[in-house]
């Protein structure tokens, strides 16, 4: 059972890699060494931009650079931020980002197509009465495949729109709470002020060009502010 799960995971990883190649996704990581104040404004002391596969090999350089900056600015709290993005489109990648969702949707199509092809092959060889046009299980699988293709096409259309928006305006910051988009802002401070004034609690995410930040506002803190 464990081996089957591992095999399925490995196959999905291959399908995902294939989907990313077809979408021409180029994984890069934008690394910044920053000082951020209580309003989430940042001072960038140094930055490194390199392909994702090089990050582990160059980890020593990242650690050395931070140590050097700590020695240079001993009173400052220096934090290293990693922002994974696609070099071609400029969009961020990673869990729950649009580009990754599109690649995942494409990989799922490949998986279902492979299952259908194998099912047809097995049934043709072993079932004398097999009919592709009437087989109930096959028809359900094809309907599932069609649904996944529609989902992918919708996600891809949204992706194209986001790519154009990003190319035309890289200075905007998008604010989310969880997965709900709250708005777009010209500066980090504007977004932070909106979040503070919103009265909402939860995890806020602020996304910009090669920039991301997140912070959590607990429910009890918002309740206390409302009482005060």
Image (cartoon, helix red, strand yellow):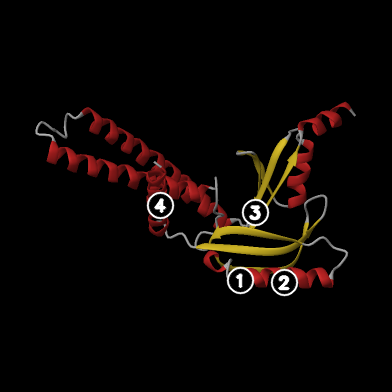
**Closer-to-camera residue (137/187):** 137
Measured in 3D between alpha carbons, the distance from the residue under mark 4 to the one under mark 1, in whole angstroms, is 26 Å
In this picture, is 113 found above or below 200?
A: below
Crowding near pointer 3: few (<14 within 10 Å), some, many (20+)?
many
Q: Earlier in the sequence, mark 4 or mark 3?
A: 4
Q: Earlier in the sequence, mark 2 or mark 3?
A: 2
Instruction: Tell me the quarter of the picture where residue 195 sits.
Output: top right
Measured in 3D between alpha carbons, the distance from the residue under mark 4 to the one under mark 2, in whole angstroms, is 36 Å
**In the image, which is nearer the foreground, mark 4 or mark 1?**
4
Count of marks, rendered view: 4
Residue at the spot x=10%, y=31% of the render? Answer: 129
Q: Residue 161: in sight, yes or no? A: no
Residue at the spot x=88%, y=64% of the render? Answer: 75
Determine which residue is flagged by label 2. Answer: 65
**Residue 208's disc number:** 3
Measured in 3D between alpha carbons, the distance from the residue under mark 2 to the one under mark 1, in whole angstroms, is 11 Å
Determine which residue is flagged by label 4. Answer: 10
**In the image, which is nearer the foreground, mark 4 or mark 3?**
4
Crowding near pointer 2: few (<14 within 10 Å), some, many (20+)?
some
Helix, strand or loop under label 1: loop
Q: Which quarter of the figure is the N terminus placed in?
A: top left
**In the image, which is nearer the foreground, mark 2 or mark 3?**
2
Measured in 3D between alpha carbons, the distance from the residue under mark 2 to the one under mark 3, in whole angstroms, is 24 Å
Q: Earlier in the sequence, mark 4 or mark 2?
A: 4
**Percent from the top left, x then y, of residue 62?**
67, 69
Residue 57 relative to residue 14: left or right: right
Contact between labelled residues 3 and 1, with CB atoms less than 8 Å apart: no
**Residue 178's disc number:** none
Q: Which quarter of the figure is the C terminus placed in?
A: top right
Q: Earlier in the sequence, mark 4 or mark 1?
A: 4
Determine which residue is flagged by label 1. Answer: 58
């Amino acid at each position: 059972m464990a081996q089957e799960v591992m095999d399925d995971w490995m196959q999905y990883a291959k399908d995902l890699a294939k989907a990313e190649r077809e979408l021409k996704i180029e994984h890069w990581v934008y690394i910044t060494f920053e000082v951020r104040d209580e309003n989430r404004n940042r001072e960038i002391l140094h930055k490194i931009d390199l392909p994702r596969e090089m990050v582990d090999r160059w980890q020593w350089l990242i650690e050395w650079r931070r140590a050097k900056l700590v020695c240079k600015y001993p009173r400052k709290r220096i934090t290293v931020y990693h922002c994974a993005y696609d070099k071609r489109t400029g969009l961020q990648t990673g869990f729950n980002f649009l580009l990754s969702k599109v690649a995942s949707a494409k990989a799922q199509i490949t998986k279902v197509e492979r299952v259908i092809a194998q099912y047809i092959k097995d049934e043709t060889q072993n079932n004398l009465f097999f009919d592709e046009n009437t087989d109930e299980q096959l028809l359900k699988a094809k309907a599932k495949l069609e649904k996944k293709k529609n989902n992918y096409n919708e996600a891809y259309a949204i992706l194209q729109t986001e790519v154009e928006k990003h190319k035309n305006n890289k200075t905007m910051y998008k604010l989310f709470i969880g997965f709900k988009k709250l708005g777009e802002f010209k500066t980090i401070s504007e977004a932070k002020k909106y979040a503070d004034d919103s009265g909402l609690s939860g995890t806020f995410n602020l996304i910009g060009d090669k920039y991301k930040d997140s912070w959590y506002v607990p429910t009890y803190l918002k309740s206390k502010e409302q009482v005060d």
